[in-house]
Image (cartoon, rainbow, N blue to C red):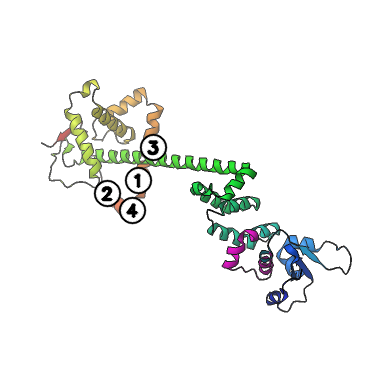
């Protein structure tokens, strides 16, 4: 079969180079004329092939690149001359070009193919690209293909590519299913971590509000030596502060707390205990029962679960402080802890 007139196209890239001295034999017997010096400079694999001794002197020099469409091999050879590849060529021959760039060690083309194929992932080609990425040692493309397949698994499993994979590559099928399980576990861990962090941030905010109520007073509850006023403007964390004030009002008047039968009082008791665990100024602190809880810990200690909670709330408090803009941190009201210790609240009428 005669080969197409490719030498004219090669001349565009080769300029004043000597005549072609080697033929690239492709599928179907089609040939592409080329220059051995260019091929050897662009690919160490082709260089090693070219330096092998020929069968006999005077015989035509050829390199066989089979199993890939002629057009893809043509684009590949053009790239070795110009190091250029159009978007249309990448769209049509990206999969074959990746295979060729891997086999013949052309890293510039392999990088282009990896990026181009990742941008063109579809439901239909996801399995093929994943398999090729694994065979061609392209980890970035492999990971992107795996994530794409995992996110669109219900649609991908209906394709012929997936059905072929199930019958011919069970190990890769297992890798995909394991990746999906691990991804789901990571999502669950992330969701759980966000819920826990939200809880610790709420507790941290409650600690700030408790100090604010016990030193400055808020709309309906304040320290014993200050008269609370309903005319006071709500603070910056009023949603949390209001809930805490309602809890304090209940705690101060509940008749069931003495025998431990009130859940709301137990919650308040835990908030006071948590404050005492993180307070670093117990002698000057105006929060009720702070010193008593400190002394109790010195005598009996805390269990590990409670210590873990305290550490996480302290960490959340630090994170919350660092996340605020510097100007806002400077504008935050400073708590005055210079008053004599007060062991009770004053409630507004």
Please tell me the numbered disc located at residue 332: 2
In x, y percent, where is residue 9? 69, 75
The answer for how far apart the CA atoms under marks 4 and 2 are is 10 Å
Quadrant into which the N terminus falls: bottom right
In x, y percent, where is residue 97? 64, 61
| CB-based contact (under 8 Å), mark 4 and mark 3 | no
Q: Nearest to the eye among marks 2 and 1: give it.
A: 1
Quadrant into which the C terminus falls: top left
In x, y percent, where is residue 328? 29, 52
The answer for how far apart the CA atoms under marks 1 and 4 are is 12 Å
Please tell me the numbered disc located at residue 312: 3
Q: Is 83 inside the magenta-drawn segment?
A: yes
Q: Residue at x 89, y 67 (%)?
A: 57
Q: Residues within 10 Å of mark 3 (few under 14, many from 20)?
A: some
Magenta segment: 73-97
- For label 4, the residue is 326
Lateral position of residue 174 relative to residue 103, left or right = left
Residue 228 visible (yes or no):
yes
SS at mark 3 in the image? helix
Lateral position of residue 19 relative to residue 78, left or right = right
For this rendering, which residue is in front, 336 or 120? 120
Specify the quadrant of the image occupied by residue 340: top left
Q: Residues within 10 Å of mark 4 (few under 14, many from 20)?
A: few
Q: First in sequence, mark 3 or 2: give its number.
A: 3
The answer for how far apart the CA atoms under marks 2 and 1 are is 13 Å
- For label 1, the residue is 320
Q: First in sequence, mark 2 or 1: give its number.
A: 1
> Is 97 rendered above or below residue 305?
below
Q: Residue furthest bottom?
A: 16
């Amino acid at each position: 079969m005669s080969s197409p007139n490719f030498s004219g196209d090669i001349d565009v890239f080769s300029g004043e180079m000597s005549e072609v001295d080697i033929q690239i034999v492709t599928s179907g017997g089609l040939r592409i004329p080329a220059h051995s010096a260019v091929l050897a400079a662009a690919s160490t694999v082709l260089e090693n092939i070219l330096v092998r001794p020929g069968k006999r002197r005077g015989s035509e020099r050829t390199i066989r690149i089979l199993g890939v469409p002629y057009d893809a091999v043509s684009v590949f050879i053009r790239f070795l001359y110009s190091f250029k590849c159009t978007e249309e060529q990448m769209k049509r021959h990206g999969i074959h070009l990746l295979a060729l760039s891997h086999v013949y060690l052309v890293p510039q083309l392999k990088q282009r193919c990896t990026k181009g194929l990742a941008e063109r992932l579809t439901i239909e080609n996801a399995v093929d690209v994943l398999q090729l990425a694994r065979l061609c040692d392209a980890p970035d493309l492999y990971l992107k293909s795996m994530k794409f397949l995992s996110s669109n698994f219900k649609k991908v499993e209906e394709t012929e590519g997936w059905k072929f994979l199930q019958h011919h590559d069970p190990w890769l099928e297992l890798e995909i299913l394991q990746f999906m399980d691990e991804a789901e576990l990571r999502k669950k861990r992330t969701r759980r971590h966000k819920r826990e962090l939200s809880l610790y941030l709420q507790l941290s905010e409650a600690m700030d509000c408790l100090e604010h109520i016990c030193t400055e007073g808020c709309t309906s509850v304040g320290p014993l030596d200050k008269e609370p006023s309903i005319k006071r403007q709500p603070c910056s964390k009023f949603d949390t502060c209001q809930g805490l004030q309602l809890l304090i009002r209940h705690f101060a008047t509940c008749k069931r707390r003495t025998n431990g039968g009130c859940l709301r009082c137990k919650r308040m008791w835990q908030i006071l205990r948590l404050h005492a665990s993180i307070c670093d100024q117990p002698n000057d602190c105006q929060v009720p029962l702070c010193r008593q809880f400190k002394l109790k810990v010195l005598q009996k200690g805390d269990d590990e679960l409670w210590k873990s909670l305290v550490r996480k709330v302290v960490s959340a408090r630090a994170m919350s402080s660092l996340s605020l803009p510097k100007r806002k941190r400077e504008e935050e009201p400073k708590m005055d802890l210079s008053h004599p210790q007060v062991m009770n609240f004053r409630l507004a009428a």
